[in-house]
Image (spheres, rainbow, N blue to C red):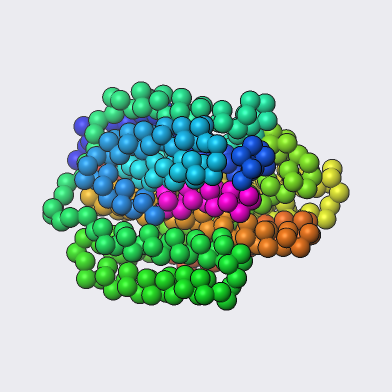
Amino acid sequence: MEKSVRGSNKMIIGIVLAVLTFWLFAQSMVNIIPAIQADLGISLGTLNIAISLTSLFSGMFIVAAGGISDKAGRKRLTYLGLVLSIIGSLCLVLAQNATLLITGRIIQGISAACIMPSTIALVKANFEGEDRQRALSYWSFGSWGGAGCCALIGGAIATYMGWRWIFVLSIVISLVAMYLLKDTPESKAEQSNTSKFNFTGLFIFIIIMLALNLVVTRGHEFGWTSPLTVALMNVIIIGSAIFFMVEIKKSNKFIEFSLFKTKAYTGAVTSNFLQNAIAGTVVVANTYVQVARGFTAFQTGLLTIGNLVAVLVMIRVGEKMLQKVGARKPMIAASIITPLGISLTALTFLPDLAYVITVFIGFMFSGIGLGLYATPSTDTAVVNIPENKVGVASGIYKMSSSLGFSFGIAISTAVYGAIVATGNTELAASAGIMVNLAFAIPSLIFIMLTISDNEGKKVLDLSSTTLKKSI
């Protein structure tokens, strides 16, 4: 049946700006670590935790937010996310110590948890066929493109205005997004049951994720065989077992495991986690060129111009490839190109000029890969999902993004921090960056095993057939 409401360009712009509040502004922290450290006098370890906490809290709450958006309304959750983004940014603007900084980062994570799945669901509810794929491309501009912009724009603001102005601008963008989305009709899913939210599953999941994050980020400091680390590992193992036992018996599951019966959805979610983990290793490269090579935050951002341009161009190329050859080929190409590009930034033995050129090319190639991956992956994750579960499905998909990015940062910076303590900065950066290969290989394998050539293409053909029949 034809939808009575069609999406508009105004709605798309509002959605893109909403997504940018997280990926452009909240994630600008990855490029301004030295500036914040100098201003607030916070240790590198604490800053790394503050950076990863946003993605971690986004990942922990995003599934719950996706389910709530289906019931309470996708527009309402988007607005809640934007309000939280304003509050989180205000905490960072006013921060004088680690407490307010970490609080603001946690709030920004919960903000992203509300915005990401609800905006994808708004796209699904208001666009069809090629229009949906075009809208998802623009959504990807905000998400993957915003991540590409964060180093350049955040670095420029931090260098010439001060890092706090990044979050002042974030507040302004949030307000503009709210204005552009004010005429967007509310979208809810028809609910066949009135079961209560699964707070037990959410609580257990949060405990597991916090324990896992502490082991990854602080295990070296605690000592890998210390009683605290061993206790945290037991919490992870036992908690995971309890989580699965509880979830199997629940009718209102926190994570809707039935979605993973769709092989393509499983491939999109798993590869999305791994691709974002690869992207998280860029934090080490950005830190290294500032600490060891003397770059300013803005100069570091200039190195990513090729990445930004490549992402923005290749997102539309990925969309067109999706329509012509399906999702499999562009996703496979992306899983090869992205890690190879990032690996070039690990050649820290090169002299300054050669290294700068190599890093620029590496970032550009990683942008090509991420751009190719974005739309085919997102479309594959939502296109075959029932309307009443699209918020939950989007939440799980975006949870994989946030957790992947969080653990990519945590693991790569943990490797970097452990080796840099020995005084060998070049080796530390190289090792921290090359961690991305541990994520890249399984990503390629999952895509090859789960994504078919017909994904995306077959849906477009079906939409065209339906349109012809209606005419």
| Rendered position, 172 above or below 222 | above
Q: Residue at x 21, y 45 (%)?
A: 71
Quick one: which residue is furthest to the right in this view? 351
Query: In the figure, is residue 459 to the left or right of 386?
Result: right
Q: Which residues are magenta?
A: 43-59
- Residue 238 lies in the magenta-colored region: no
Q: Position of residue 239 (x, y in %)?
A: 37, 71
Quick one: which residue is furthest to the left in this view? 193
Q: Position of residue 124 (x, y in %)?
A: 32, 42
Q: Position of residue 153 (x, y in %)?
A: 61, 32
Q: Nearer the viewer, residue 247 or 398?
A: 247
Q: Residue at x 29, y 28 (%)?
A: 184
Q: Nearer the viewer, residue 4 or 426?
A: 426
Quarter of the picture holding the C terminus: top left
- Residue 50 lies in the magenta-colored region: yes
Q: Position of residue 324 (x, y in %)?
A: 47, 47
